[in-house]
Amino acid sequence: MDYRAEAVKCVDRYVLPEMKRQFEECGCSLDEQYKKYGAAEYFFANIIEPGRVYEIGYPKCVCQKAQSEKDSDPNFCECSRQSILYVYEKLIPDKKVTVETIETALTGGSKCRFRVVVE
């Protein structure tokens, strides 16, 4: 499976436009965006190092494909990592962004957590 292509299809219509709206509303500052919107029912964001390092994720698996599979393949979590990377690349195209998977619900974690580093 091409996880990048799946990720783009998944977030391009709703998630990316909403994240862009929030980002612009907050003065194009991830820190301000996450202070305001980082504690939603379906999404969380913690500022680890302002302007540079964030921990973001979901309190449970939000992937519709993974949820529809009888035995969900933990590799689906790469799609989430790719979707996060894609959104950041669109929000801050002039920065280098890396996204690391910390834990996911499909691999036995209590939630889905990703570390994002902006350089």
Image: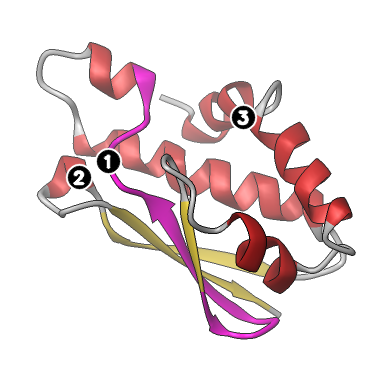
78 displayed left or right of 66? right
What segment is highlighted magenta in the picture? Answer: 47-64
Instruction: Give the distance between the C-alpha atoms of the residues marked 2 and 3, in whole angstroms.
Output: 20 Å
Residue 105 marker: 2
Are the residues tagged 2 and 3 within 8 Å (C-beta)?
no
36 displayed left or right of 83? right
Q: Nearer the viewer, mark 1 or mark 3?
A: 1
Please tell me in which quadrant of the rendered image residue 66 appears: top left
Q: Of 104 and 97, which appears nearest the observer?
A: 104
Residue 6, horizontal then vertical, whole percent: 52, 25
Are the residues tagged 2 and 1 within 8 Å (C-beta)?
yes
- Amino acid residing under circle 1: Lys
Dot 3 corresponds to which residue?
Answer: 11
Instruction: Give the distance between the C-alpha atoms of the residues marked 2 and 1, in whole angstroms.
Output: 6 Å
Q: Residue at x 11, y 13 (%)?
A: 70
Callout 3: 10 Å neighbours few (<14), some, many (20+)?
some
Residue 82, horizontal then vertical, whole percent: 52, 44
Q: Nearer the viewer, mark 2 or mark 1?
A: 1
Dot 1 corresponds to which residue?
Answer: 60
Residue 29, horizontal then vertical, whole percent: 80, 68
Mark 3 residue element: helix
Q: Residue at x 82, y 42 (%)?
A: 21
Instruction: Give the distance between the C-alpha atoms of the residues marked 1 and 3, in whole angstroms.
Output: 17 Å
Who comes first in sequence, dot 2 or dot 1? Answer: 1
Q: Magenta includes 56?
A: yes
Who comes first in sequence, dot 1 or dot 3? Answer: 3
- Amino acid residing under circle 2: Ala
Q: Residue at x 86, y 53 (%)?
A: 25
Q: Magenta includes 40?
A: no
Please tell me in which quadrant of the rendered image residue 50 appears: bottom right
Who comes first in sequence, dot 2 or dot 3? Answer: 3
Residue 41, horizontal then vertical, whole percent: 42, 42
